[in-house]
Image: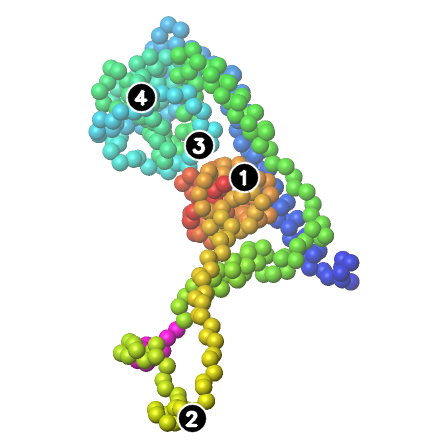
């Protein structure tokens, strides 16, 4: 026997089951993404606190270390690249890239490979021991540093070399190399504490953003709009059509038959002067014997005033929601409300996105605004959701 509520219906139970299942799946996806990011942040924090090199690590390397110089990291599969055209790179920064972009194993345009060999990272410099010789990038002479966001290439400018050069690495080693290069450069300018403080702040913010398990919905919370295919969205569209269409019909001119319009244009006097009545009195004696015509009261014709078109809520097509989110404009939404998926159709894995709130071309909303892969699998990006 199917369970029923006090009204004898079962659709409320089906609605509660669907909503709870969807909310739990979204929570599990968001929680898994949160745990992965938390593990990565804490790993980087541990590495930043224990990042120390040793002179013994240089044993067997075909290079001599200076006084007090130690080796942090080595990679045998590095390529030396040079930029064909002179470019000005941004100054080196101590920003930690916790969410590295998806890189493709390709060489950007305008960059050529000139050598390959062993890359060595010390507390004084970055060195490439290649087949054609050695290339050094000393931290004290470094004026520019740029990590390509789409390719595994890092370009460096130094004072004692005119041409911009750098390293092309395997994609799997890029994230580790870039973080350790940041730590080595920070060590050289005595700013490692700034990197550690930055990681502590990121961990604190991430801990505050931990997903909260959603409350269980009961059948009594089901609204009558849940029985309509499409739910609240269908009801909102129907209400908007019911308001707008009558206003459009009222403001439009009535249809005119072509024959009547041409006749009115050809004889304007006939349209304003009524035709003579067949019972009108004759001129002369007949007119004297006819009774005096009754005076009739004419009612003046009042032209109806045009009614203003009703103004709908400012949403520009967005579904009604208690958060004030719309498609009209305003501010981007980087931290949407927890109940946003109750009013918008969220993509699978919604809370694992890192960006701002956008709508995809299939009508779903995603938290991937500003990313290269925004709305991937949902026919691409359509527009931004604003508040």
The residue carrying pointer 1 sits among few (fewer than 14), some (14 to 19) or many (20 or more) residues within 10 Å by Cα, namely some
Q: Which residues are magenta?
A: 255-264
At a point 43% along the width and 23% down the height, the residue shown is: 95
Residue mark closest to the camera, 3 vs 2: 2
**Magenta stretch, main secondary structure class:** helix
**First in residue order: circle 3 vs circle 4:** 3
Mark found first going from the N terminus, 1 or 3: 3
The residue to which callout 4 is attached is 144
- Residue at the spot x=39%, y=73% of the render? 255
Asked if 43 appears above or below 71 in the picture, the reply is: below
In this view, the residue in front, 115 or 381, is: 381
Label placed on residue 289: 2
Quadrant where the N terminus is found in the figure:
bottom right
Q: Residue at x 57, y 25 (%)?
A: 204
Q: Give the alpha-carbon distance from disc 1 to disc 3, as whole Å.
A: 23 Å
Report x, y in % for residue 328: 45, 46
Q: Which residue is mark 1?
A: 336
């Amino acid at each position: 026997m199917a369970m029923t509520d006090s009204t004898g219906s079962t659709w409320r139970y089906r609605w509660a089951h669907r909503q709870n299942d969807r909310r739990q799946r979204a929570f599990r996806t968001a929680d898994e993404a949160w745990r992965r990011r938390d593990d990565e942040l804490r790993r980087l924090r541990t590495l930043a606190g224990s990042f120390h090199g040793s002179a013994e690590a240089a044993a067997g390397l075909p290079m001599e270390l200076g006084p007090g110089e130690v080796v942090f990291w080595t990679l045998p599969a590095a390529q030396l690249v040079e930029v064909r055209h002179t470019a000005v790179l941004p100054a080196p920064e101590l920003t930690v890239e916790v969410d590295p972009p998806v890189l493709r194993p390709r060489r950007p345009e305008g960059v050529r490979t000139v050598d390959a060999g062993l890359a060595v990272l010390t507390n004084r410099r970055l060195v490439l021991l290649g087949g054609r010789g050695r290339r050094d990038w000393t931290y004290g002479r470094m004026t520019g540093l740029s990590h390509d966001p789409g390719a595994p290439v890092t370009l460096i400018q130094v004072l004692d070399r005119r041409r911009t050069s750098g390293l092309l690495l395997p994609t799997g080693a890029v994230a580790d190399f870039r973080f350790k290069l940041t730590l080595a450069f920070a060590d050289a300018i005595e700013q490692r504490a700034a990197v550690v403080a930055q990681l502590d702040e990121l961990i604190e913010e991430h801990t505050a953003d931990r997903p909260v398990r959603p409350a269980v919905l009961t059948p009594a919370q089901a609204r009558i709009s849940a029985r309509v295919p499409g739910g609240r969205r269908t009801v909102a569209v129907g209400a908007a059509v019911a308001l707008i269409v009558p206003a459009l019909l009222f403001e439009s001119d009535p249809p005119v038959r072509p024959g009547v319009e041409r006749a009115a244009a050809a004889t304007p006097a006939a349209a304003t002067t009524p035709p003579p009545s067949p019972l009108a009195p004759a001129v002369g004696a007949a007119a004297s014997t006819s009774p005096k015509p009754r005076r009739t009261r004419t009612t003046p014709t009042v032209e109806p005033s045009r009614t203003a078109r009703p103004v709908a809520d400012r949403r520009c097509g967005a579904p009604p929601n208690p958060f004030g989110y719309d498609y009209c404009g305003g501010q981007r939404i980087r931290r949407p409300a927890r109940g946003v998926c109750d009013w918008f159709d969220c993509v699978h894995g919604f809370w694992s996105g890192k960006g701002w709130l956008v709508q995809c071309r299939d009508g779903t909303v995603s938290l991937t605004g500003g990313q290269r892969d925004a709305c991937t699998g949902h026919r691409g990006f359509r527009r931004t959701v604003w508040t």
